[in-house]
Image (cartoon, rainbow, N blue to C red):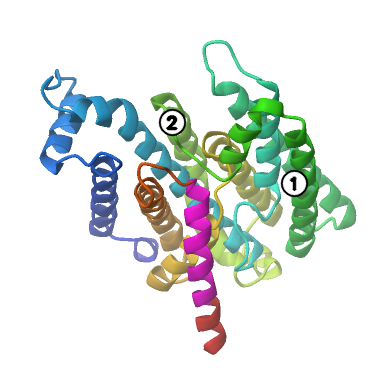
Amino acid sequence: MKQRREGFRPATYVLFLAVTAAALVLCVCLGSVSLPLKDTLRTLVRAALGLAQDARSLAPSIVVPVRLPRVLCVAAVGAALSLCGAAMQGLLKNPLADGSTMGVSSGASLGAIIALAFGVSVPGLPFAGTTVLAILFAFGSLLLILGVAYRLDSSLSTNTIILLGVIFSMFASSVSSFIITFAGERVKTIMFWTLGSLQGSSYQNAAVLYVTLAVCGAILLAHGRELNAFAVGEDNARNIGVYVRRVKLTVLICVSVLIGVCVSVSGTIGFVGLVTPHMLRRLTGPNHRRLLPASVFGGAVFLMLADLLARTVLSPRELPIGVVTSFVGSIVFVYIFFRSRGR
């Protein structure tokens, strides 16, 4: 009975799903060309059932091939980044931690920039080259940081990991700038991508994102109790039976995979994993068995609304989604910081 009380009731998950679905439909309806809700819902239902679309309606030519795959990708990226941020904050016991604290995000971005700059691709899968290099560089960054951290401190303390992550992020950023300098005609594409953009996302991208989120996200959600134990200190967690090093490695590997896949599809999007868990923690409390699943839905809704704002605020021009999340996230984070300092 105690385990059941730690998590949400089924009705709460139904509410989360309803809010997420409402945000998804809203984002599919609105854009440079707004579509009636009735036409959008009819198109989505027909597409889900495999029925023929109404040739007289404009919605099928916009919803199915363009907006739906983009919104699905946005939701998956937001959910993954928010989940990574909540897990990293619990693991490192640092409110400023998110998925990029380890330097994994910078490493994944470096790999994707190399793929974009030199045109690395896999025949038949145009996006696979960027995805593969992003994941490989994310793993390489993780192994390098953990290896150096272990040589400096065999206990893998959080302070050592954070410091090395910041140093590696600066190094990866300088290498990325060096590559961009010689990117030639691809500079504009790379610069727009580094600000975060899901323009042109496909169902293939969505499939990769959701499969990765299902596997790695399930593992992170299963470690909610261990992350709760980390809140009272690693020594106390070890005394109550938590395998500290194994939990650390498992969480860090899952975070690196999720970030690598997200960065390869969306580019670098900041503040989602930093701010969203903070906002949700005020509603759910510090219990990670509640915070982690709430972060999945909250991150998806937050990024979908941010993407909607990026598409509509200067329509027909489109802002990079990273600009919107950084602007909104910085304001929210400053507000949260002053509220916490005031208390």
Q: Residue at x 58, y 66 (%)?
A: 229
Residue 321 colored magenta?
yes
Q: Secondary structure at mark 1?
A: helix
| Quarter of the rendering occupied by the N terminus | bottom left
Q: x, y percentage for residue 189?
A: 59, 32
The residue at 85%/49% (across/down) is 148
Residue 222 visible in the displayed image:
no
Q: Earlier in the sequence, mark 2 or mark 1?
A: 1
| Image location of residue 272, percent across then percent down | 50, 55
Nearest the viewer among 23 and 223 is 23
Q: Amino acid at mark 2?
A: Ser
Q: Which residue is mark 1?
A: 173
Mark 2 to mark 1 CA distance (whole Å):
25 Å
Q: Which residues are magenta?
A: 320-336
Quadrant hosting residue 15: bottom left
- Residue beneath disc 2: 201
Q: Which mark is residue 312?
A: none
Residue 221: x and y in percent read: 47, 51
Residue 74, given in percent of the width and then of the height, sits at 41, 42
For mark 1, does the 10 Å Cα neighbourhood hold few (<14), some (14 to 19), or many (20 or more) residues? Answer: some
Is 164 contained in the magenta span? Answer: no
Q: Which element is circle 2 on?
A: loop
User: Is residue 237 left or right of 41 when viewed as pictured?
Assistant: right
Which residue is outermost to the top?
A: 123
Q: Nearer the viewer, residue 316 or 97?
A: 316
The relative height of residue 280 versus residue 341 in the rendered view (above or below) is above
- Count the marks: 2
Location of residue 121 (image quadrant): top right
